[in-house]
Image (cartoon, rainbow, N blue to C red):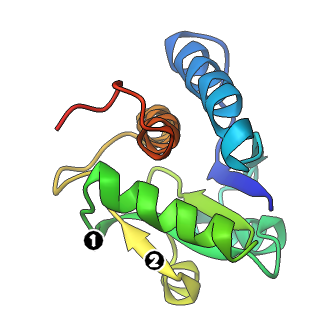
């Protein structure tokens, strides 16, 4: 099994980068005994300013072909943390790779959304895509703690 986060843009040093690293390190330590691998970050950047269509092309090339595709989109479902953990465990149990996709400032092109196995949202508000990385990393860690029976997640 492989878990990737494919994201538009480069996360430079700073608070967001520190938080993503911290949560993904925690996920790796907690997830390893559960059969969950460390998360790979794949960053794509459209330096020519082609917009969502150009970003979609870069993302399409970055997404492993056999992966379950989970996209972050404001129109997506709003699962609870335990529901998210259950879905991650299901992919693990199927030995299926996962690719979680975060679009750029304008969101995701419809062609990427159409390919998704699951579209999820962190609420009806729009979040900066770099902050979504932090929240996604935290939710992955939270999912691992839920699956491990850790007290980190409180109902």
| Residue at position x 45%, y 77% in the image | 118
Tag count: 2
In the rendered structure, the answer to whether residue 32 lies left or right of residue 147 reads: right
Would you say 130 lies left or right of 39 here?
left
| Quadrant position of the C terminus in the picture | top left
Residue found 62% across the figure and 71% down from its top: 91
Answer with the quarter of the image where residue 26 lies: top right
The N terminus appears in which quarter of the rendering? Answer: bottom right
For mark 1, give the secondary structure. Answer: strand
x%, y% of residue 36? 70, 48
Q: Residues within 10 Å of mark 2 (few under 14, many from 20)?
A: some
Please say if 19 is above or below 142.
above
**Residue contact between numbered discs 1 and 2, judged by CB atoms under 8 Å:** yes
Secondary element under disc 2, as helix, strand or loop, is: strand
The residue to which callout 2 is attached is 118
Q: Position of residue 54 (x, y in %)?
A: 69, 69
Q: Disc 1 and disc 2: Cα gap in Å? A: 8 Å
Q: Nearer the viewer, residue 50 or 149?
A: 149
Nearest the camera: 60 or 70? Answer: 70
| Image coords of residue 63 (percent x, y) | 76, 69
Query: Residue 23 location, x and y as percent?
Result: 56, 25
- Please give left or right for residue 124 compared with residue 90 in the image: left
Task: Name the one closer to the observer, 152 or 114.
Answer: 152
- The numbered mark, 1 or 2, whose residue comes first in the sequence reads 1
- Residue 53 is at least partly visible in this image: no
Q: Residue at coordinates 67% horizontally, 21% vertically from top-left? A: 12
- Residue in front for this viewpoint, 87 or 108: 87
Vertical comparison of 107 with 57: above or below: above
Q: Which residue is mark 1?
A: 77
Identify which residue is drawn at 47% across, 35% down. Answer: 145
How many residues crowd mark 1 within 10 Å: few (<14), some (14–19), many (20+)? some
């Amino acid at each position: 099994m492989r878990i990737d986060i494919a994201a538009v843009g480069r996360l430079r040093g700073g608070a967001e980068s520190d938080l993503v690293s911290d949560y993904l390190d925690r996920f790796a330590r907690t997830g390893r005994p559960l059969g969950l691998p460390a998360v790979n970050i794949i960053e794509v950047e459209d330096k020519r300013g082609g917009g969502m269509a150009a970003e979609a092309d870069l993302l399409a090339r970055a997404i492993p072909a056999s992966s379950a595709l989970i996209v972050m989109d404001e129109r997506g479902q709003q699962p609870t943390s335990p529901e998210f953990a259950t879905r991650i465990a299901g992919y693990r149990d199927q030995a299926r790779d996962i690719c979680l996709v975060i679009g750029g400032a304008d969101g995701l092109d419809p062609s990427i959304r159409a390919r998704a196995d699951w579209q999820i949202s962190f609420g009806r508000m729009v979040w900066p895509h770099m902050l979504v990385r932090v929240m996604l990393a935290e939710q992955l860690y939270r999912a691992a703690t839920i699956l491990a029976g850790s007290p980190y997640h409180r109902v």
